[in-house]
Image (cartoon, helix red, strand yellow):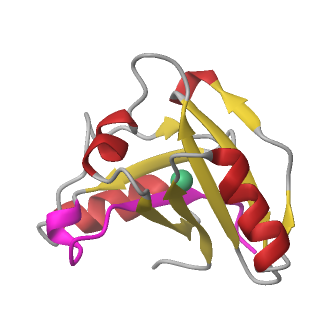
Amino acid sequence: MIGRLNHVAIVVPDLAAATALYRNALGATVSDPVDVPAHGVTTVFVLLPNTKIELLHPLGENSPIAGFLAKNPAGGMHHICYEVTDIRAARDHLLAEGARVLGDGEPKIGAHGLPVLFLHPKDFCGTLVELEEVAAA
Ligand code: CO
């Protein structure tokens, strides 16, 4: 059911320092910071040949990742995102398998303008999983 790894998201306490680390120490291609107010984050995209890394930093007072950073002051891996071609069918399958979908279970428009859902980390080996609907290949 799941397709490609779309991205791995890492919450960082210092976006400029993390960007420099990926650009200089790891030699990766990195984007300029992009504010995504609807999701309460500023993102830097690290473009790899086969996937992306998204460096996330809280934006605004009610950022959904502020609590994560409070608990993990050095930063840490926040979620992984897998691509699916039919997000509602994927959700229905997962619910039938006993997995928990976060929120009201309806896909929301994510940071890339595509429908996304999040799955409960306790059901997926301690990892927050994002599903993103992409066009069928
Ligand atoms: Co994501």
Quarter of the rendering containing residue 96? bottom left
Residue 42 % position (x, y): 64, 36
Image point (39%, 19%), residue name: 62
Please say whether residue 130 is one of the residues in the magenta stretch.
Answer: yes
The residue drawn where x is 21% and y is 78% is: 125
- The x, y position of residue 32, in whole percent, is 86, 45
Which quarter of the figure is the N terminus placed in?
A: bottom left
Position of the C terminus, as image quadrant, is: bottom right
* Residue at the top extreme, as displayed: 61
Say if 47 sits above or below 32 in the image: below
Q: Is residue 25 left or right of residue 70?
A: right
Q: In the visual, does 76 lie left or right of 42?
A: left
86 or 108: nearer the viewer: 108
Residue in view at x 11 percent, y 67 percent = 98
Count how many numbered circles sit on residues in the image: 0
Which residue range is magenta in the image? 121-137
| Snapshot quadrant of residue 78 | bottom left
* Vertical relation: 60 (above or below) 64: above
Q: Is residue 60 above or below residue 68?
A: above
Residue 31 rendering spot, x and y as whole percentages? 85, 52
Q: Is residue 102 left or right of residue 27?
A: left
Residue at the (30%, 69%) spot, across then down: 127
Coordinates of residue 102 in the picture (x, y in percent): 25, 45
Q: Is residue 64 above or below residue 123?
A: above
**Is-magenta flag for residue 18?**
no
